[in-house]
Amino acid sequence: MNNRGKGREKKKGKSMKRHYMLIGICLLLPALVIYLLFMAYPLCRTFVLSFTNWTGFGEAKSVGFQNFTNIFQDHTFWMALKNTIYFAVFSAIFSVLLGLVLAWLNLYMRRMEGQIFRTILFSPSMIAPTITGLLFLFVFTEDVGLLNSLLKAVGLSNLTTAWLSNMATVKPVIVIATVWRQFGLTMVLCYAGLQGVSNELIESARLDGASELQIFRRILVPLIKPQIELATMFTMLGGLRIYDSVVSLTAGGPARQTVVLPMWIVENAFTYSKYGYASAMCVAFIGVVLIFILILKLLFRGESYEY
């Protein structure tokens, strides 16, 4: 092919590249517009309002860093932050551990039974958090709750308690409800990673005398580290933004001991009309979320495995 032919081919290739790039931009444009309208703009607006005393009506007057100063003196904010971190950390730990173990057990099930098993266990993840809270309300209610009724039926009436009013049990109950809704997603993610592990590698380990537990701990878990990290990220973020299930289970009680940060932000904005202060708490909350993401990145850094 002469130089002129090569030039035409090169020009045609550039034209096709620009054509496909234009198609890609057109396909991405609606998503970009939606992101800018419903994510980027509200976030920027929240940051601006955090420096004002806006009440939802009238002009927003600048107060500088006063809202952020008030956060340090807000006892409820720190209690809500502590509760939010408690729910996020413990729900993430138990969701990931339970989902990982169930994903591993799925490997030993036949295809049809495994599909049914995974569908049943994943279904709680598709239920709205408010519905989850109401379901567990029927379980842990003191008088007519399912758990207390079962304890009485088997002669363990001394173990019955007001699960949602007892300070020692109310937080673990919320963690249980959150784990029940989240572990299915972890199971599916980890199972997808386990399916990608070479069978030859597992059989080789068995021939070398490794037990199933050793294979799980020393081979399977390190090889699905990206899936575990992703599952931990999802469950941790889900715990940090917990709101609906707490409202339906305890409404922040007893004595506001289970109030969480999203609940306190919503209350300040829509009950007390302190939109400026609520925006400042949102900005602080975003900082907390970013810190947790950074911590997770540091925890999961390290060696990579190939298989």
Image: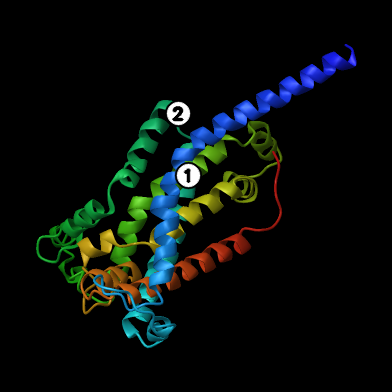
Q: Is residue 290 left or right of residue 271?
A: right
Residue at the spot 30% in from the left edge and 64% down from the top edge: 174
Nearest the eye: 117 or 87: 87
Q: Which residue is mark 2?
A: 110
Mark 2 vs mark 1: which is more N-terminal? 1
Residue at the spot 75% in from the left edge and 22% down from the top edge: 11
Question: Is mark 2 in CB contact (under 8 Å) with mark 1?
Answer: no
SS assignment at label 1: helix
Question: Which color scheme did the rendering employ for the protein?
Answer: rainbow
Q: Amino acid at mark 2?
A: Arg
Nearest the eye: 157 or 269: 269
Q: Amino acid at mark 1?
A: Leu
Question: Where does the N terminus fall, quadrant-wise?
Answer: top right
**Label 2 crowd bin: few (<14), some (14–19), many (20+), radius 10 Å:** few
SS assignment at label 2: loop
| Residue 274 in the image, given as x and y percentages of width and height | 28, 76
| Image position of 302 with respect to 1: above or below | below
| Residue 204 in the image, given as x and y percentages of width and height | 70, 36
| Residue 103 in the image, given as x and y percentages of width and height | 47, 43
The Cα atoms of the two marked residues, 2 and 1, are separated by 43 Å
Question: Where does the C terminus fall, quadrant-wise?
Answer: top right
Q: Which residue is mark 1?
A: 32
| Residue 144 in the image, given as x and y percentages of width and height | 10, 60
Residue 119: name its quadrant.
top left
Q: Is residue 13 left or right of residue 146?
A: right
Nearest the eye: 283 or 139: 283
